[in-house]
Amino acid sequence: MTVGLGVPKLGGKARWSVGIGGLVKAGRIVVVGALGALALAWVSRGAADGIPEDPTLFYAGVLEEAGAPVDGVRNVRVRLFDDPMTGTELCVTSASGVAFDEGRFRVPLVEACADAVRDEPDLWVELEVGTDAPFPRTKLGAVPYALEAESADVARGAEGALAARLSGVEGRVTVNEGAIDEVDGRVAALESRVVVRGFCFDGGGGLSSSPGFASLSVDRTGTGTYAISSSPSVSTGDSCTCSVQTSGRLARVVLVELDSGGFFVRVGDSNGAAHDEAVCCTCVSE
């Protein structure tokens, strides 16, 4: 059962592809691993003899640098928050020496994170790899394990025609260890091309971070107003959100615009009055 998703780019070098999917088979929860999948997933310790009482929550994904999958070991840190920008840190998992095999990695999260996923309806995940800056936070969607466990129990107890139909479906599913699962010989989950880009601007004329963009430029277009342009540009079909932060020197956001020519954010107020604030923006495209 997949319960979340992640962020695809960091600093212009590391690239994440994002995909989510899950499959219940023979009483086990099997993650459907689309190439480039980055997700939170409940992984059962048991097999066909029953659903475990103590499942483990993993954070898994694929990391590329300069177009090539990463191998070796990296330090990974995963945090869960109750707000997309500020809020309360609900848990943190710091894993040293995480193995990367052709880009793939998996980190078991601490119990506090499992509790947070069960208890909190709205969570945001923040990821750090090595010494790079954290990815922008992304929304975490969760389905309680108990719902999947109940469905699996019903399937195991099926009789007659229902049992025959379930058996027929199971026979069409191929679970490939360490590879992509298949249904009728076809890949069971399609690769997603979701891209998340973001930046923070401190109001001092420079950008404090710009993960996912090849370049960003800041132009002062008037008293107290700046235009922040990006390359590659973000299209009108993308979803962009900006939030004023509580630190840094910046006037409040007065306008966010998207058009066919590109993307820019205007910050500042008409009389150029300074405020003790900063702004961060995140854009999601498919």
Image (cartoon, rainbow, N blue to C red):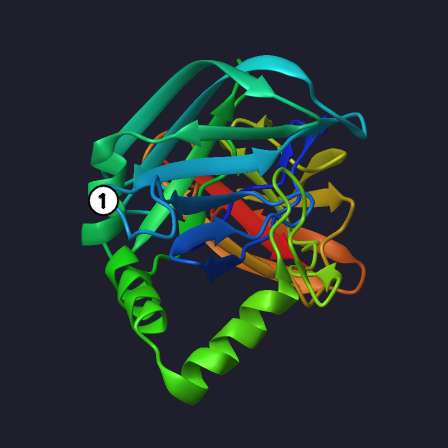
Is 123 located above or below residue 278 in the figure? below
Report the amino acid beneath label 1: Ala
Is 138 located above or below residue 211 in the figure? below
Q: Name the residue nearer the viewer: 85 or 120.
A: 120
Percent x, y of residue 190: 69, 59
Crowding near the residue tagged with mark 1, few <14, some 14–19, many ≥20 C-alpha atoms within 10 Å:
some
Quadrant where the image shows the N terminus: bottom left
Q: Give the secondary structure at mark 1.
A: helix
Residue 247 shows in the view: yes
Q: Name the residue nearer the viewer: 164 or 34.
A: 164
Percent x, y of residue 105: 56, 28
Residue 179 in the figure: left or right of residue 84: right
Residue beneath the point at 60% across and 54% down: 284
Q: Name the residue nearer the viewer: 214 or 155.
A: 155
Residue 172 in the figure: left or right of residue 52: right
Q: Name the residue nearer the viewer: 199 or 111.
A: 111
Q: How many labels does the image show?
A: 1
Residue beneath the point at 67% across and 55% down: 192
Is 48 located above or below residue 68 in the figure? below
Residue at label 1? 116
Quadrant where the image shows the C terminus: bottom right
Residue 4 shows in the view: no
Residue 47 in the figure: left or right of residue 69: left
Residue lying furthest bottom in this view? 161
Percent x, y of residue 205: 59, 28
Percent x, y of residue 91: 25, 32
Residue beneath the point at 28% across and 52% down: 51
Residue beneath the point at 23% across and 41% down: 54
